[in-house]
Image (cartoon, rainbow, N blue to C red):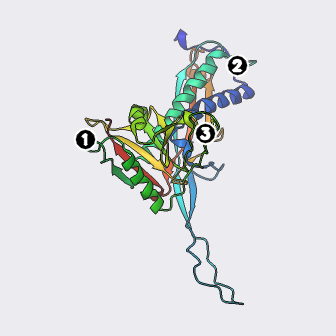
């Protein structure tokens, strides 16, 4: 057990907070699927249920007003969607010195690696919820001979029409062309998420614009690869891929408020450090210490009509 020792009896609260922050910052970088969600905090001492709220649109007021007569008005119609949180976590044995007067590099590395793991865990959970959406279709306009086919502009446009007909609000504003050579305007758009295996197929889609060609160099976000018409694409190595032959990829395309998650804060997730000897009589020789994470989390589709999963194969 010599390779799993630490050498202090306590971790100062200020240092514990430092490691919490290191864990959260590392986790946030992995949240490609989660980044587009409606977020709700976990209220303290209020049980394990999160409430998301969705309001219906008001019906058109197409009856002419009568002079001197107040119209009846309308009431807001809301739908409350609840979800029960679950707890997740993991830990590693830490090595080297835990110093209560400063941040040790070994524990910082442990916090960062655990943060990456926690972020990937959250992202996978969200991804699996997203691809369970009831609104789904197969790409059918490609030429690779598979069912579904590779992605095409016609398939993307069909999804856009489906979302528009459901009154799903677009999630990004238009980006005008810039003054730089080769820049092009980008339409208002929905977000799409694709596995990195498909970047070559995305670039073959008619009218594809790379994020580097946007008129505003600051308009793109982390993980953004480019745009095809009214969809801007994020790519991740953690996209949903089936075990079929050939593999089928599920690509969520979504509008505003399609799904929700619990917010990632220090109240919902933490880096837990157990110094050597903290197990008491279970560790009589002060041989074991660990660094781990624990989080309360849930993801929930809020409106299946505001999201659509396009299934494709590689060309």
Q: CA distance from mark 1 to mark 3?
A: 37 Å
Tell me the number on the disc at residue 103: 2
- Per the image, label 1 sits on a secondary structure element best described as loop
- On the rendered image, what quadrant is the C terminus found in? top left
- Per the image, label 3 sits on a secondary structure element best described as loop
Q: CA distance from mark 2 to mark 3?
A: 43 Å
- Per the image, label 2 sits on a secondary structure element best described as loop
Task: Please count the marks in the image.
Answer: 3
Looking at the picture, how far across and down is residue 31, in whole percent?
Answer: 54, 37
Quadrant of the rendered image containing residue 59: bottom right
Looking at the picture, how far across and down is residue 89, in whole percent?
Answer: 52, 34
**Callout in the foreground (2, 3):** 3
Residue at 57% x, 46% y is 262
Looking at the picture, how far across and down is residue 280, in whole percent?
Answer: 61, 23
Tell me the number on the disc at residue 137: none
Residue at 30% x, 36% y is 247
Residue furthest out toward the left: 145
Looking at the picture, how far across and down is residue 108, in whole percent?
Answer: 63, 21
The answer to which of 129 and 273 lies nearer the viewer is 129
Tell me the number on the disc at residue 215: 3
**Callout in the foreground (1, 3):** 3
Residue indicated by mark 1: 146
Q: Vertical placement of 141 versus 31: above or below?
A: below
């Amino acid at each position: 057990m010599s390779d799993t020792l630490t050498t202090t009896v306590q971790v100062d609260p200020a240092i514990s907070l430092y490691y919490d922050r290191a864990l959260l910052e590392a986790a946030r970088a992995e949240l490609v699927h989660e980044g587009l969600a409606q977020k709700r905090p976990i209220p303290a001492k209020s049980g394990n249920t999160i409430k998301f709220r969705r309001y219906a649109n008001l019906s058109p007021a197409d009856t002419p007003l009568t002079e001197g007569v107040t119209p009846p008005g309308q009431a807001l119609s809301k739908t409350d969607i609840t979800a029960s949180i679950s707890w997740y976590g993991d830990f590693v044995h830490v090595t080297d010195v835990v110093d209560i007067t400063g941040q040790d590099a070994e524990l910082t590395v442990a916090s960062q690696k655990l943060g990456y793991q926690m972020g990937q865990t959250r992202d996978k959970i969200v991804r699996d919820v997203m691809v369970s959406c009831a609104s789904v279709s197969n790409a059918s306009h490609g030429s690779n001979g598979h069912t579904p086919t590779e992605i095409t502009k016609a398939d993307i446009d069909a999804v856009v029409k489906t979302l528009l007909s459901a009154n799903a609000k677009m999630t990004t504003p238009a980006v005008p062309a810039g003054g730089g050579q080769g820049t092009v305007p980008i339409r208002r758009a929905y977000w799409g998420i694709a596995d990195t295996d498909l970047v070559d197929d995305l670039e073959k889609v008619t009218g594809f614009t790379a994020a580097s060609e946007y008129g505003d160099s600051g308009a793109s976000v982390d993980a953004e690869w480019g745009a095809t018409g009214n969809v801007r694409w994020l790519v991740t190595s953690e996209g949903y891929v089936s075990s079929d032959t050939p593999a089928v990829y599920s690509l969520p395309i979504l509008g505003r408020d399609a799904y929700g998650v619990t917010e990632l804060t220090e109240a919902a997730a933490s880096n837990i450090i157990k110094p050597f000897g903290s197990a008491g009589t279970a560790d009589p020789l002060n041989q074991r210490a660990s660094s781990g994470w624990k989080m309360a989390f849930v993801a929930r589709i809020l409106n299946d009509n505001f999201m659509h999963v396009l299934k494709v194969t590689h060309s």
